[in-house]
Image: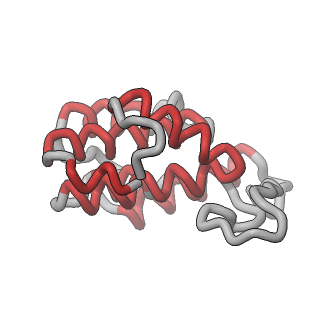
Amino acid sequence: MLALIDMDDTRLREVARWCVTKAYKFAGLADRPWIAPALATLHAGDPLPSPFDDPATASAHFDVECRREAPDRVSNRQGVIYSIGEFDPFDMGPISRPAFALPTIFAAAKPDPRQAAFEALYGASVTYQEDARELHGQLRAAFGIAPGQP
């Protein structure tokens, strides 16, 4: 979404945090007891708490939790079809929405606000896959981006 290019750093941080929240809620992660404090900390602008102080540690924690919740499940994947016969940058085939949502918090915490916003938006868009256009519409409404503005 090219409209982000013209935003100031404060607004870009707001976009990045908004994208993380949307991705985590959509993927069913936002209310988990070990994740909710990290979201609150991100919104406060403070350094992320453990296990989010290190992406590898957070990912390992996530993997353990997934195995505990579904020990007999081989994969946490769900089939998603976003487009048929057209190139779509958000169509990654069958994915685990939570696994794609998880790294958006690290994107949003990057030092460069523009990079944080674009990477968090991309991660949220892939998490939403076939509903990415809905996400983008919500982003436009939330941040006053006119329809048709790239």
69 lies left or right of 27? right
Residue drawn at the location 32% of the way across and 46% of the way down = 16
Q: Is residue 144 above or below residue 124?
A: above
Q: Can the viewer see residue 34?
A: no
Residue 93, percent from left and from top:
75, 66
The one nearer the camera, 135 or 32, is 135
Q: Is residue 55 above or below residue 98?
A: below
The one nearer the camera, 88 or 25, is 88
The one nearer the camera, 41 or 142, is 142
Residue drawn at the location 24% of the way across and 46% of the way down = 12
The total of numbered circles placed on residues is: 0
Colouring style: secondary structure
Residue 5, percent from left and from top:
25, 56
The residue furthest front is 148
30 lies left or right of 5? right
Residue 133, percent from left and from top:
60, 44
The one nearer the camera, 82 or 104, is 82
Residue drawn at the location 55% of the way across and 33% of the way down = 25
Rendered-image quadrant of the N terminus: bottom left
Q: Is residue 32 above or below residue 83?
A: above
Q: Can the viewer see residue 9?
A: yes
Residue 24, percent from left and from top:
51, 40
Q: Is residue 1 above or below residue 30?
A: below
Residue drawn at the location 79% of the way across and 55% of the way down = 80
